[in-house]
């Protein structure tokens, strides 16, 4: 982009690139400025405002999404590097019949107060539960050769990249463990 406008022909514009990105199961062809983060592309170009811009430095986790099934901080990734990749945002977690079991557990256990961090918490929790299913150890996993036991300490460690300024942590841990038990 030059002067805030696309040239109309990406090949003629040294400051932008065209990418194909699948978001929540829907394909998108986007022409993006090379400096555009995934978070900004999601919010400003695709209108998916569930992922939040908290710190813009990868420290708070409010922008967490799933990239090819793994959790990432979308404020740290340049969108033009993601051609052909698949992104899942909080808007894509629910199924056709309503909330996912994880989302329902967050509601049932009051795992939010103001709700600002909730989209990032949910995406991180979804990715974290998949890691546990694969028996990926964390810094607090006791037996590195055995299955991962989802204790409160394990959940807290794995979710430590997501801040909640309202301090709903105990309820978040309870909700995640409840969702894991229902899997």
Image: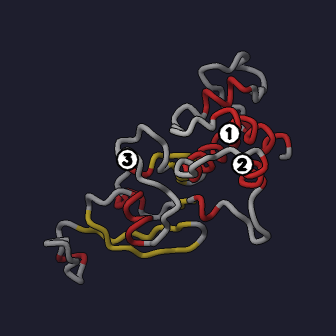
Tag 2 near tag 1, CB within 8 Å: yes
Question: Which residue position is annotated with label 2?
Answer: 106
Q: Tag 3: Cα neighbours inside 10 Å, few (<14), some, or many (≥20)?
A: some
Give the structural element (helix, strand or loop) at label 1.
helix
Q: Nearer the viewer, residue 72 or 22?
A: 72
Q: Position of residue 105 (x, y in %)?
A: 77, 49
Alpha carbon of mark 3 to alpha carbon of mark 1: how far?
24 Å
Q: Position of residue 138 (x, y in %)?
A: 62, 25
**Quarter holding the N terminus?**
bottom left
Give the structural element (helix, strand or loop) at label 2.
helix
Please identify, in this view, whether the residue under mark 3 or under mark 2 is nearer the observer. Answer: 2
Q: Position of residue 140 (x, y in %)?
A: 64, 19
Where is 138 relative to 76, above or below? above
With 164 as the anchor, is 4 left or right in this view? left
Q: Position of residue 106 (x, y in %)?
A: 72, 48
Question: Which residue position is annotated with label 3?
Answer: 76
Where is 162 relative to 126, above or below? above
Residue placed furthest toward the bottom = 8
Q: Looking at the rendering, which quadrant does residue 171 occupy?
A: top right
Sequence order check, earlier mark of 2 and 1: 2
Name the residue: 74% across, 42% down: 175
Question: Which residue position is annotated with label 1?
Answer: 172
Sequence order check, earlier mark of 3 and 1: 3
Tag 3 near tag 2, CB within 8 Å: no
Name the residue: 35% across, 56% down: 37
Q: Nearer the viewer, residue 29 or 108?
A: 108
């Amino acid at each position: 982009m030059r002067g805030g406008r696309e040239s109309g022909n990406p090949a003629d514009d040294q400051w932008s690139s065209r990418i194909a990105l699948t978001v929540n199961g829907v394909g998108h062809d986007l022409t993006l400025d090379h400096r555009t983060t995934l978070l900004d592309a999601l919010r400003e170009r695709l209108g998916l405002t569930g992922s939040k811009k908290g710190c813009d430095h990868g420290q708070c986790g409010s922008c967490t999404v799933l990239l090819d099934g793994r959790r990432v901080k979308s404020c740290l990734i340049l969108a033009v590097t993601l051609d052909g990749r698949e992104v899942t945002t909080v808007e894509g977690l629910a199924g056709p019949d309503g909330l996912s079991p994880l989302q329902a557990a967050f509601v049932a256990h009051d795992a939010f107060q103001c709700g600002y961090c909730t989209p990032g918490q949910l995406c991180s929790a979804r990715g974290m539960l998949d890691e546990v299913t694969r028996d990926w150890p964390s810094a607090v996993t006791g037996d590195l050769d055995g299955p991962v036991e989802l204790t409160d300490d394990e959940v807290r460690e794995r979710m430590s990249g997501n801040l909640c300024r309202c301090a709903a942590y105990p309820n978040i841990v309870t909700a995640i463990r409840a969702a894991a038990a229902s899997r």
